[in-house]
């Protein structure tokens, strides 16, 4: 999880009982399953409101609760993840919400998630002082130590609305893949830091993979996802190679390795090769 907080004031160290009403949840859907209704209920018990962006392109049989606190921001066509985030943030800003926390439809949270998150923000401020440029922190995995990290995924992103605006929102040239990574890189470029914590936990599925020779996992991405990922990496090289060269090189090597594994062990090589080329050439 990540909390975006720049120059927090002393008042931010003392959250009252109504603190969770300063937080809005952003939930982006794409042909959701019925269990998403339970997630909406959980979010309503934790946050002041839930902003829903439904990117499903046709009707589905999941009827979301029509109740106070649920705000439908968009529905009816797939506008992509970055634009969905930006629309929800714009609405939250209009409503005077101070923080937003982003979720996917397969996310799960524990009771007290928001209160614990807000508490950890106060702990960071107390430790590093009022003049720090801490942008946020994210939840960790077993075995990880607390400290500064380079990036986090979008699901679980806990951020102050004013800091999203200050950084420039989410890059809508990226449809799905890389939206979170580019945002974190741009935040770091602007002097923010992202911190890891093990105090706040959230469940999230990261996609299917195939175990090869019981040694390595091969992500089973569709040709469309391959195109999006390659396009994101091409933009990353063009925009940030001279800012964070080591990070960008690691990213290119990592992606090349996983593409090689997909070409070697998964069917549909020709379709993925065409998608790779399209991702490189896409403006």
Image (cartoon, rainbow, N blue to C red):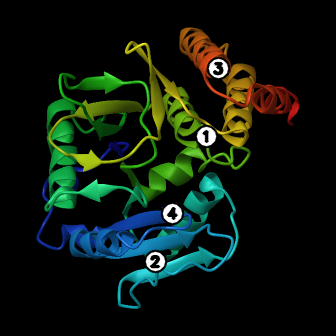
- Position of 23 relative to 234 (above/below): below
Earlier along the polypeptide chain: callout 2 or callout 4?
4
Quadrant hosting residue 12: bottom left
Is residue 243 in view?
no
- Mark earlier in primary sequence (3, 2): 2
Left-right relation of 256 to 140: right
Circles 1 and 3, Cβ within 8 Å, touching? The answer is: no
Q: Quadrant of residue 127?
A: top left
Q: Toward the viewer: 90 or 34?
A: 34
Residue in the image at 22% along x and 59% along y = 114
Q: Compare marks 3 and 4 and give the one earlier in the sequence.
A: 4
Whole-Å distance between the Cαs marked 2 and 4? Answer: 19 Å
The answer to which of 191 and 1 lies nearer the viewer is 1
> SS of the residue at dot 3?
helix
Q: Dot 4: few (<14), some (14–19), or many (≥20) neighbours within 10 Å?
A: many
- Which x, y percent locates residue 2? 35, 42
State the residue position of label 1: 177
Would you call the spot at circle 2 few (<14 residues within 10 Å), some (14-19), or many (20 or more)? few
Position of residue 84 in the picture relative to residue 279 (left or right): left
Above or below: residue 155 compared with residue 206 = below
Label 1: element kind: loop
Name the residue beneath numbered marker 3. 259
List the residue tagged with mark 4.
28
Q: How far apart are marks 3 and 2 (CA)?
A: 43 Å
Mark 2 element type: helix
């Amino acid at each position: 999880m990540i909390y975006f907080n720049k120059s927090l004031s002393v008042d931010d160290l003392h959250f009252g009982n109504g603190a969770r009403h300063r937080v809005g949840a952003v939930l982006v859907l794409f042909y959701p399953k019925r269990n998403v209704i339970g997630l909406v209920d959980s979010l309503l018990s934790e946050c002041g409101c839930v902003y829903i962006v439904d990117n499903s392109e046709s009707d589905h049989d999941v009827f979301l609760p029509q109740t106070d606190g649920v705000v439908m921001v968009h529905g009816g066509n797939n506008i992509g993840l970055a634009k969905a985030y930006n629309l929800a943030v714009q609405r939250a800003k209009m409503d005077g919400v101070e923080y937003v926390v982003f979720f996917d439809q397969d996310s799960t949270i524990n009771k007290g998630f928001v209160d614990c998150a807000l508490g950890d923000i106060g702990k960071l401020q107390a430790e590093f002082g009022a003049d720090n440029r801490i942008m946020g922190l994210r939840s960790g995995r077993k075995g990880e130590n607390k400290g500064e990290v380079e990036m986090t995924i979008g699901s679980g992103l806990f951020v102050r609305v004013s800091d999203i605006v200050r950084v420039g929102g989410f890059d809508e040239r990226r449809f799905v893949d890389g939206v979170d990574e580019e945002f974190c890189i741009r935040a770091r470029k602007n002097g923010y830091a992202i911190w890891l914590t093990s105090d706040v936990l959230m469940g999230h599925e990261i996609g299917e993979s195939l175990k090869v020779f019981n040694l390595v996992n091969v992500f089973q991405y569709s040709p469309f996802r391959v195109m999006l990922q390659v396009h994101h990496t091409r933009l990353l090289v063009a925009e940030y190679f001279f800012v964070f060269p080591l990070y960008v090189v690691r990213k290119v090597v990592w992606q090349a390795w996983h593409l090689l594994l997909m070409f070697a062990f998964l069917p549909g090589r020709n379709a993925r090769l065409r998608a790779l080329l399209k991702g490189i050439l896409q403006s």
